[in-house]
Amino acid sequence: GAGVSQSPSNKVTEKGKDVELRCDPISGHTALYWYRQSLGQGLEFLIYFQGNSAPDKSGLPSDRFSAERTGGSVSTLTIQRTQQEDSAVYLCASSFRGLQGTGELFFGEGSRLTVL
Amino acid sequence: AQSVTQLDSHVSVSEGTPVLLRCNYSSSYSPSLFWYVQHPNKGLQLLLKYTSAATLVKGINGFEAEFKKSETSFHLTKPSAHMSDAAEYFCVVSDFKAAGNKLTFGGGTRVLVKP
């Protein structure tokens, strides 16, 4: 497709389970971001990938969160031992060269995670 | 450091009347500023951006914003609201020198348009 694709769109899980969220960016975009959108919290930066460079992981809230980007394309955000406070919408965005390019981010529709 | 404050969490306007969404930012260097819109259950979409060229920036759907350095503001306006403008709007600041590749989002302003 032409846009950023995220899956699943909705995920309900039990506390303590692991979850994986997938992001398929726009073809040719070298920069990929994960943000978390919680009710009343706004958008929180999680992690940034740019090409083959080491990712900027400074926004990951705990060591239960990890992300990888394979082949410079698809990215997976993994949350281990989920907690109720992890409930949020996880947004992925891609960009041509990140903020050093046009600066415009293209967002997916998000993955809504509910931890019971 | 960089930060952004959206002064109104909710704005209610009547269709056909002007819209004003207020945004103030803080940045140590020369920021780029953006407004994004998010319709229900949709991803965020760029409305417009300021990157140190003209201070009055025109975006899509009739929106525009003015960068005022002296007031550290980047307010979003539209002369005449349409029902389709009902959405949440985010003011965003980016300063590569201050914060690298992180974008900092404001808390959002939810716009309600009354018929």
Image: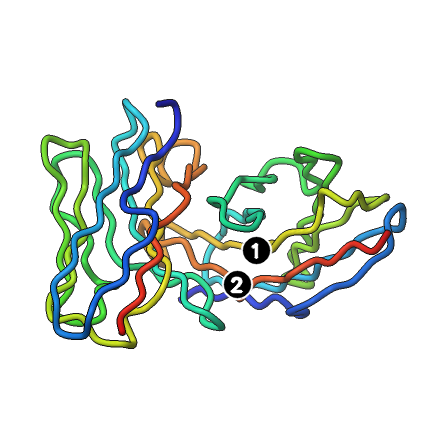
Is there one chain holding both mark 1 and mark 2?
yes
Read off the chain for label 2.
B
Q: Amino acid at mark 2?
A: Gly
Query: Circle 2 sits in a helix, a strand or a loop, which is it?
Result: loop
What residue would you read off at disc 2? B106
**Which residue is at the front of the view, A37 or A53?**
A37
Read off the chain for label 1.
B
Specify the quadrant that holds the C terminus of chain A. bottom left
Q: Residue at x 53, y 66 (%)?
A: B107
Q: Report the Cα–Cα distance between label 1 and label 2.
A: 5 Å
Q: Residues within 10 Å of mark 1 (few under 14, many from 20)?
A: many
Q: Choose top left, top right, bottom left or bottom right for residue B20.
A: bottom right
What residue would you read off at disc 1? B91
Q: How is the image coloured?
A: rainbow
Q: Earlier in the sequence, mark 1 or mark 2?
A: 1
Q: Amino acid at mark 1?
A: Cys
